[in-house]
Each structure stands twice: as structure tokens, then as C-alpha cells.
Image (spheres, helix red, strand yellow):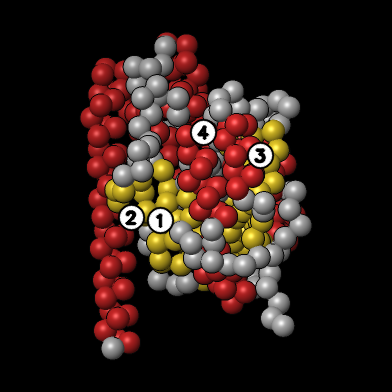
């Protein structure tokens, strides 16, 4: 009889009852035969317990736990992902969903590359109403990326299409999950630490998950900008810098990227949703991340009201990069079909 590795799909949630049915159902209806589903409710105040009661009755493989108090993103994820005793663990946010063959495909890839700490895929973006929009892909030629290449690539950002990941449990245990990790950018930090520990990663350029990009009407995410900046500072100082020093690599590339990131994020700090005190804190964090004459000039321009222009410029660059990635991926697929034919 063939050995079928066990897989746990872990779904952290907080006040997203409206999306749980789709997310949990997609996890429970995988084509792969050996899957259990874990949901950790970070002390939600909406209808999450009632929704989960119904889902637990419908799907016996679901394990549901309600935290007695709010633990935050990193705390809830660490607790949740340390519960299963499976060989592989999938992190799936409660507003996202998996295609039926997600687990089957990625287990096969992780078995093919035992030195990979995690696997990720192309994704279908959708809005808060479930309408499909653009496709998210990672622009890279190789299916497998070794640890050193992954570490260097991560300097410019979190190198996945979306934070829907299948991890090798051994790697998570070795790194103690998100323990003591920065809040809000804990996923990026974990990817850096996994590469530093000697694990590569594997990418499937196939749409195997749906990632929700929702309109932040109340600007809740923008209000977390200080957490994001603090997280970036910690990642570079506590994860990247020691990793580069251990390898004897030149750390100037880290300083350069920090300055670049500070400039990129500066426009967001001048949105009208922030009051004067909040903006002063954000400017201080920008300088801690990567101070430079260019940043100081940018801050001066932003204080004069140029934030909408710089924000538009950044979003335009991101859209253009996404378009190029999609075109290159389609060209790659067409070439593969012709070769096979």
C-alpha cells in the first residue's frame, strides 16, 4: 500500500464569518485523500462560532478552536500551526480558498524536492464579492529555488504570489513557527528564516488557489502601516543581517533595499487618514527603516501635498510588473504546449 503523507490545512480567522463557508469548504473538498482541517478563531466578535458549528457538523474532519482572548496574527498562527501532527501544513487565510487539486499538486512537488521548506502557486485574485480579477504569478524560470537564491531574492520582498503556502512541518518546527516574529509581516519574516535555515522552495505556475483582495473602505489596513514598517525594520535587522553575516555576504545590498523600501512606503504615510501625531511616528519609522537624502526630499514633497501623485506612480508600476509577469507566464505555457506537441 502506498504511503500517503498527512496534510493539515490551517485556517486562522478573526471576524470573517462571511467568508468562512467558502474557505473551509474548499479545504474539506480536496481531491487528496489524507487531509484534516484546523480553524483557530482569534476571539471573533461576529457570527464565526455559529458558522463554524454548522461547518463542523457538515465536515467531520474539521477541528475548531476559539481562543479565549485575541492573540494577534503571529500568536494565533503559531498556536494553530503547532497543533496538527501531519507531515505537511497549509496556511490558508479565512477569506481565501483552494482549488480542489491544490493539496494533491503541492504534496507531489514537496516529495519531488525534499530540500524545499515550502511550496506556493499562482493564484486567482478575487474581490470581496467573489468576482475574479487578475492572475497573480511569480516571475521565475525554475520550479525549485535553493536556499541561498531564495534568501537573496527575498531581499526585494516576499517572493510569493499570495500568502497561501504549503509548508514542510519539519521546517516550521525547527524555526518554532512565528514565535517572536513581527506582527503583520510575519509571513515574510518566516520565508527569510526558512531560507536562512537551508531550505529552498518550490513554485507551481498553475492557478491552484483564490486570493481575496478587498476594498478597504474603513482604511483598516492602511492604519496598520506602523506595524508594517516596524516589521520590516525587524526583518532586516533580526533576520536578514545575521543571515548575511553568517555567509560572509556584503550587507550593502540590505542597506540599499532598506532605503528603497522607505521611499516606496513614504507616500502611504501621508494619506489623510493619519493625524499629525500618527504621521510623525510613521516618518520616524521611515527614517529608521532607511534614511537618505532622497527620502528627506520625498518627505518634504509629500508634506506639500504630492502624496496622490507618488501613490499613483507606485500603483502604476505594480500593475505594469503584474502585466509583464502574466505575459511572460502565458508565453512560457504556450512554448511548453508547442514543444509537447
Residue at disc 4, secondary structure? loop
Mark 2 highlights which residue?
A: 135
Counting other residues with Cα less than 10 Å from the Cα at mark 3, is it few (<14), some (14-19), or many (20 or more)? many
Q: Is residue 26 or residue 155 the one in the foreground? A: 26
Residue shown at 31% from the left, 73% from the top:
333
Q: Quadrant of residue 55?
A: top right
Q: Is residue 237 or residue 274 the one in the foreground? A: 274
Q: Is residue 328 or residue 97 the one in the foreground? A: 97
Foreground label between 2 and 4: 4
Residue shown at 69% from the left, 33% from the top:
66
Residue at disc 2, secondary structure? strand
Residue 206's disc number: none
Gap between marks 3 and 2, in whole Å? 28 Å
Residue 40's disc number: 3
Describe residue 271's horizontal placement relative to residue 84 as left or right.
left
Residue 4 x/y as whole percent: 68, 73
Gap between marks 2 and 1, in whole Å? 6 Å
Is there any visible trace of residue 226 in the rendered image?
A: yes
Mark 1 highlights which residue?
A: 123
Mark 4 highlights which residue?
A: 16
Sequence-wise, the earlier of marks 2 and 1 is 1
Counting other residues with Cα less than 10 Å from the Cα at mark 1, is it few (<14), some (14-19), or many (20 or more)? many
Sequence-wise, the earlier of marks 3 and 1 is 3
The answer to whether the residue labelled 2 contacts the one labelled 1, judged by CB atoms less than 8 Å apart, is yes
Q: Quadrant of residue 201?
A: bottom right
Residue 339 x/y as whole percent: 30, 86
Gap between marks 2 and 4, in whole Å? 23 Å
Foreground label between 1 and 4: 4
Gap between marks 1 and 4, in whole Å? 20 Å
The answer to whether the residue labelled 3 contacts the one labelled 4, judged by CB atoms less than 8 Å apart, is no
Residue 16 x/y as whole percent: 51, 33
Amino acid at each position: 500500500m502506498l504511503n500517503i503523507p498527512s496534510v493539515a490545512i490551517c485556517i486562522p480567522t478573526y471576524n470573517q464569518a462571511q467568508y468562512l463557508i467558502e474557505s473551509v469548504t474548499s479545504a474539506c473538498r480536496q481531491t487528496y485523500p489524507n487531509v484534516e482541517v484546523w480553524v483557530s478563531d482569534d476571539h471573533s466578535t461576529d457570527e464565526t462560532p455559529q458558522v463554524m458549528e454548522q461547518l463542523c457538523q457538515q465536515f467531520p474532519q474539521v477541528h475548531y478552536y476559539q481562543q479565549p482572548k485575541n492573540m494577534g496574527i503571529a500568536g494565533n498562527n503559531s498556536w494553530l500551526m503547532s497543533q496538527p501532527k501531519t507531515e505537511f501544513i497549509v496556511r490558508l487565510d479565512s477569506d481565501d480558498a483552494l482549488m480542489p487539486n491544490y493539496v494533491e499538486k503541492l504534496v507531489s512537488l514537496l516529495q519531488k524536492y525534499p530540500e524545499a521548506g515550502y511550496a506556493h502557486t499562482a493564484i486567482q485574485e478575487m474581490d470581496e464579492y467573489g468576482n475574479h480579477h487578475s492572475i497573480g504569478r511569480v516571475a521565475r524560470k525554475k520550479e525549485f529555488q535553493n536556499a541561498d537564491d531564495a534568501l537573496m531574492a527575498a531581499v526585494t520582498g516576499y517572493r510569493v504570489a499570495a500568502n497561501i503556502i504549503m509548508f514542510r512541518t519539519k521546517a516550521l518546527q525547527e524555526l518554532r513557527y512565528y514565535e517572536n516574529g513581527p506582527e503583520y509581516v510575519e509571513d515574510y519574516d518566516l520565508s527569510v528564516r526558512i531560507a536562512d535555515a537551508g531550505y529552498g522552495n518550490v513554485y507551481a505556475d498553475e492557478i491552484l488557489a483564490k486570493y481575496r483582495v478587498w476594498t478597504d473602505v474603513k482604511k483598516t489596513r492602511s492604519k496598520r502601516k506602523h506595524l508594517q514598517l516596524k516589521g520590516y525594520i525587524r526583518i532586516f535587522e533580526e533576520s536578514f543581517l545575521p543571515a548575511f553575516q553568517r555567509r560572509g555576504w556584503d550587507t550593502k545590498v540590505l542597506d540599499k533595499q532598506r532605503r528603497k523600501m522607505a521611499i516606496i512606503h513614504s507616500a502611504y504615510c501621508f494619506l489623510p487618514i493619519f493625524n499629525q501625531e500618527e504621521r510623525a511616528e510613521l516618518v520616524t519609522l521611515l527614517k529608521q527603516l532607511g534614511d537618505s537624502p532622497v527620502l528627506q526630499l520625498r518627505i518634504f514633497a509629500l508634506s506639500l501635498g504630492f502624496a496622490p501623485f507618488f501613490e499613483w506612480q507606485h500603483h502604476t508600476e505594480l500593475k505594469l510588473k503584474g502585466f509583464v509577469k502574466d505575459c511572460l507566464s502565458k508565453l512560457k505555457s504556450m512554448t511548453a504546449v508547442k514543444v509537447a506537441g
